[in-house]
Amino acid sequence: MAERDREFVEFVEGAGASLRRTAFLVVGDRHRADDVVQEAFYKLYLAWPKVRRVGNPLAYARRMVVNAAHDGGRRPWRREVAIGDLPERVDHEDFAAGHADRDEVLEALRSLGPRQRACVVLRYYEDLSVEQTAEILGCTTGTVKSQAARGLDTLRRAIDRRRTSRAL
């Protein structure tokens, strides 16, 4: 195996799980997240010599994942399709409290717009700084701060509404 390929495989093995989690939190669907990460890895492989020279491949890959997630939503075959009958809702009371809380947060994350969701995931799940998040998203630090604040506010309201409706 060529040195370039060996380094790329090592990177994918080390960063793959983290990038899949990020993609899942940004897109809200495991299958789409796998597609997004696969697309990002394909593009990353093509750019690997440049990425190695510049350094910090994880930051570059995160940006590719976020960009691929946003681009994927614009493709017609990726859009949601309306159905006549809604499936039965899962009763979250049957799950352990940790699973119920996680499901609440994931559902609330899905209610955010793509940019807010990306800001919240990168800032608070990936624990990146405002500057790192701005660099990945290609925006200003002020935009990251405002989008993250609005996103957290929306998350709090969505979770509060859900808990209030369950209590009734």
Image (cartoon, rainbow, N blue to C red):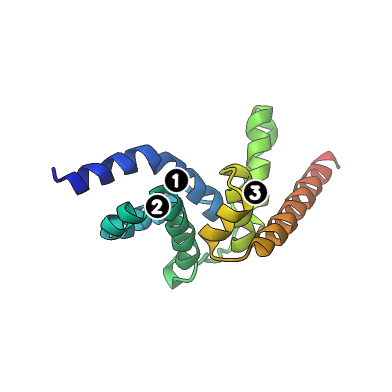
Viewer-side label of 2, 3? 2
The residue under label 2 is: 37
Does the image show residue 45?
A: no
> Disc 1 residue type?
Arg
SS of the residue under disc 1: helix
Residue at the (59%, 43%) spot, across then down: 127
Left or right? Give the position of 105 relative to 52: right
Which quadrant does the C terminus fall into? top right
> Disc 3 residue type?
Glu
Viewer-side label of 3, 1? 1
Q: Name the disc covering residue 20, or none.
A: 1
Q: Residue 82 lies in what quarter of the image?
A: bottom right
Which quadrant does the N terminus fall into? top left
SS of the residue under disc 2: helix
Q: Position of residue 123 (x, y in %)?
A: 62, 49
Circle 1 crowding by C-alpha within 10 Å: few under 14, some 14–19, many from 20: many
The residue under label 3 is: 107
Does the image show residue 80?
A: yes
Q: Residue 11 lies in what quarter of the image?
A: top left
Q: Position of residue 89 (x, y in %)?
A: 64, 46
Residue at the (63%, 53%) spot, across then down: 130
